[in-house]
Image: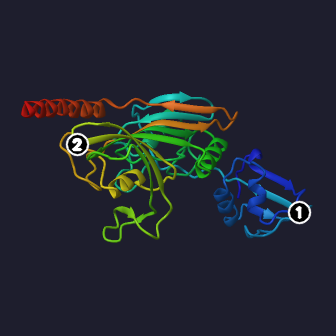
Amino acid sequence: MENFLTKEFMNIVATVNANRIDQFLYGKELGLSREHIKKLSNQGYVLLNGVRPKVSDKVRIGDRISISIPPPKRLDVIPESIPIKVLYEDDCLVVVDKPAGISAHPGPGHETGTLVNALLYRYPDLPGIGGIQRPGIVHRLDKDTSGLMVVAKTGKAHTNISQQFKERLVVKRYIALVTGILKPQKGLINGSIGRDRINRKRMAVVADGKEARTFFWKQKVLDNHTVVEIKPETGRTHQIRVHMASIGHPLFGDYIYGTQNSLLPHHFLHAHSLTFLHPDNGKVIEMRSCLPSNLKFILNELAKMSSVNETNKDDKVL
């Protein structure tokens, strides 16, 4: 516990009682999540009256709490000069338009070429914000899902936006193309999601899974396919893909939950709208992203096929 900057060491005298020390510290708005506070406490960086406490220990008026924040661990992720499309940026956050085919952060099998590698090249001060392998990342998109992601540039912003996601204050909307003609104009899919019992690499709707809710609105029918706008209320792994497949309409090109398509090497899903509150001033930030050119191409091709089929249908009637 050495080499701390002055601002990273705090002494606090309790003026109120609290049931748990982690709740007390979280309420002090130190720019730390409760998970981070628990980790610091478990590692001995939090002291209650000079003694290492349990996170469940109670705080009484007059107690002295000290908390030390260690410097970030060495980051093994290598900055890479990868082009990224930035749609909004200020001192505490950045909103990027992630292309399909790039992972949000490093993981097994893709240690390089990720959004994090690109962000570290552009923003060298990100290490230590939100985790060693995921600096700045508040939420994620699947590798093959394109669209909007917000990235925190400060610890305070990371904690604030993470809490907004936890409290479901962030609104995300997607454009998807699903197979088949969706009958209802709108609906809600309410099905708990967990690991598929047969194939553990897949997710599935299971009785003992985590709560998952997905709203959808039918937009357009194109040659036995349906364009859908989707708003997930929760953020489970593969949620949209699993839920649409569960009602018999898997995403176009989804080789895991549906059928691979030669026109597109990945599933058709784009995060086109993102709304959240600015962590500093509370103002509403609403971002939009147009469909990528390859997804527009698919819709145009299907529109052409629809026109041909309608013409053939008319010819048969005549």
- The quadrant holding residue 195 is bottom left
Of label 1 and label 2, which has the lower sequence position?
Answer: 1
* Residue closest to the eye, 63 or 176: 176
Q: Amino acid at mark 1?
A: Asp
Q: Position of residue 205 (x, y in %)?
A: 40, 63
Q: Which mark is residue 244?
A: none
Q: Which residue is mark 1?
A: 63
Q: Residue 220 in the image: x percent, y percent? A: 32, 36
| Residue in the picture at 75% in, 48% down | 29
Foreground label between 1 and 2: 2
Q: For mark 2, does the 10 Å Cα neighbourhood hold few (<14), some (14 to 19), or many (20 or more) residues?
A: few
Front residue of 262 and 306? 306
Whole-angstrom CA distance, mark 1 to mark 2, is 67 Å
What secondary structure is marked by label 2?
A: loop
Identify residue for label 2: 224
Q: Residue furthest right?
A: 62
Q: Are marks 1 and 2 in contact (CB under 8 Å)?
A: no
In the image, what residue occupies the spot 62% across and 33% down? Answer: 284
Looking at the image, is 293 positioned above or below residue 53?
above
Image check: 225 left or right of 211?
left
Q: Is residue 220 visible?
A: yes
Q: Is residue 196 left or right of residue 66?
A: left
Name the spot of residue 289 as percent of width and height, x first.
Answer: 44, 31
